[in-house]
Image (tube, rainbow, N blue to C red):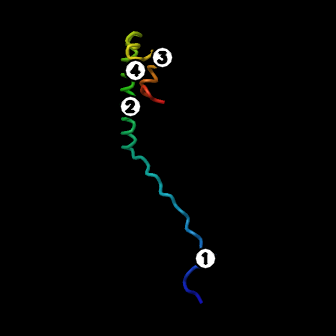
Amino acid sequence: MSTGTIPADEFVAPAVVEPEAPRPSLIGKILAGYAAWIIWRAQRHDLRRLEAMDDRMLADIGVARAEIGHLVRFGRHGA
């Protein structure tokens, strides 16, 4: 006599399929590249301005010449 149900010892759970992460579109990649380029240009501009200062001006703002690159990339409290 079959009731139409599967006995518990024969039941196999269906495989869990993770949804695929959406792939970035071409426009998304272009915009991300453009944003990275804008950030790079701003950092380059700041780097050049700080490197143009003499050591006394840098000391006035509390920056050593050796740390200019790090400060421009990561900020004063950056990692």
**Can you identify the residue that label 1 sits on?**
8
Q: Position of residue 29 (x, y in %)?
A: 40, 41
- For label 2, the SS is helix
Q: Position of residue 3 (x, y in %)?
A: 55, 86
| Sooner in the amino-acid sequence: mark 3 or mark 2 | 2
* Mark 4: amino acid: Leu
Q: Residues within 10 Å of mark 3 (few under 14, many from 20)?
A: few
**Can you identify the residue that label 3 sits on?**
66
Q: Quadrant of residue 10?
A: bottom right
Measured in 3D between alpha carbons, the distance from the residue under mark 2 to the one under mark 1, in whole angstroms, is 59 Å
| Sooner in the amino-acid sequence: mark 3 or mark 1 | 1
Q: Residue at x 44, y 28 (%)?
A: 77
| Sooner in the amino-acid sequence: mark 2 or mark 1 | 1
**Can you identify the residue that label 2 sits on?**
37
* Mark 2: amino acid: Trp
- For label 1, the SS is helix
Observer-side mark, 4 or 1, equals 1
Measured in 3D between alpha carbons, the distance from the residue under mark 4 to the one under mark 1, in whole angstroms, is 69 Å
- For label 3, the SS is helix
Asked whether the beta carbons under mark 3 and mark 4 sit within 8 Å of each other, the answer is no
**Can you identify the residue that label 4 sits on?**
47
* Mark 3: amino acid: Ala
Q: Residues within 10 Å of mark 2 (few under 14, many from 20)?
A: few
Measured in 3D between alpha carbons, the distance from the residue under mark 3 to the one under mark 2, in whole angstroms, is 25 Å
